[in-house]
Amino acid sequence: MIRYELRGWTLPLVLGGLLLAAGAGAQTAPQPPKASKHAKAPKEAAETPPKPVLEPKAIDLLKAASSRLAAARSMSFTAVISYENPSLFGPPLVYTTKSEVLLQRPDKLRVITSGDGPASEFYYDGKTMTALSPAENLVAIADAPPTIDAALKAAFDSAAIYFPFTDVMVADPYGDIAGTLQTAFYIGQSHVVAGTTTDMVAYATDDVFVQLWIGAEDKLPRRSRAVYHNDPAQLRHQMDLSDWQLDVDVPADSFTCAKAATAKHIKFARPDQIPPGLGPPPEAKPKAKGKPKAKGKPSKTQ
């Protein structure tokens, strides 16, 4: 996953919002009643965490969605991802990306992403994977393993490329979470999300807590909200999935990048591994000011 920041316009908006909220609160907030000197503080009830449960209805819905996705020989969908990033003032800011996804099992994938940051394109044709940055006209091409699942892992291992919708593209979505599934329960139905009726399910694995909206009729995932257990800020990630088309006819040239021929080639590398020449120049050391040294006997290091 590529992280980025938008500077220059976010801070004034956040500061203005906080000042307005503070002013409104000062005018309308009622004063709390004064506590009696003789009043005793109520004893806090000991909170016991709920026991993990795996409700059969929730498991059935997760398996049904997984089976529907796994059975499709090809699919296309649109993913709009909104994720929170901390701000200097405390409350998180929200950034959004949009990805147009096309895949053909078992070894073809294309992801075109735009949003609140640099655009990117990813192509996988069963033999090679290609990552393109259109604005910078940079492209990286590398050999890839023969399946979508293995190619997604190779892209992450070699260049930290990660797609939040990976769970709906793998060969066995339920199988990928079954081994670490701790909790799953049914919430109810929604008639608002995605303009259709959805069944709401929540589940938790070793890493993440997810609320998932699944189409009641077509069993396709429509929305998910995730919070990662190891995130101290408990930032939320939301993904809306739409424009689903399953078993579509895919043109043979859909998974090749025509722009790669004219782009500057670079190697796949993780963000923490900066290629020589692409890092910041070394800082020039300031010249020492003061009286010139007196001429005399040279030192042993001269």
Image (cartoon, rainbow, N blue to C red):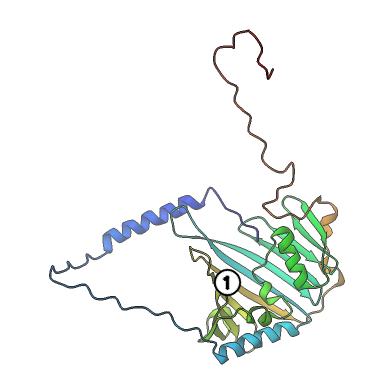
Q: Position of residue 109 (x, y in %)?
A: 77, 70
Q: Nearer the viewer, residue 216 or 47?
A: 47
Identify the residue shown where x is 66% and y is 55%. Answer: 118
- Residue 1 in view: yes
Relative to 144, residue 5 above or below: above
In the visual, does 27 lie left or right of 230? left
Residue lying farthest to the front in this orientation = 300
Q: Which residue is farthest top?
A: 295
Residue 41: give x, y in percent of width and height.
Answer: 21, 72
Q: Residue furthest left?
A: 38
Residue topped by disc 1: 207
Residue at 34%, 78% in the rendered image = 46
Q: Residue flagged by tag 1: what amino acid is it?
A: Asp
**Is residue 203 shown left or right of residue 249?**
left
> 54 or 5, which lies in front?
54
Q: Position of residue 72 (x, y in %)?
A: 76, 83
Quarter occupied by residue 25: bottom left
Mark 1 burial class by Cα count in 10 Å: few <14, some 14-19, many 20+: few
User: In the rendered image, is residue 216 in sight?
Assistant: no
Q: Which image quarter: residue 66?
A: bottom right
Quadrant in the picture for the C terminus = top right
Q: Residue at x 60, y 73 (%)?
A: 240
Residue 1, horizontal then vertical, whole percent = 65, 61
Helix, strand or loop under label 1: loop
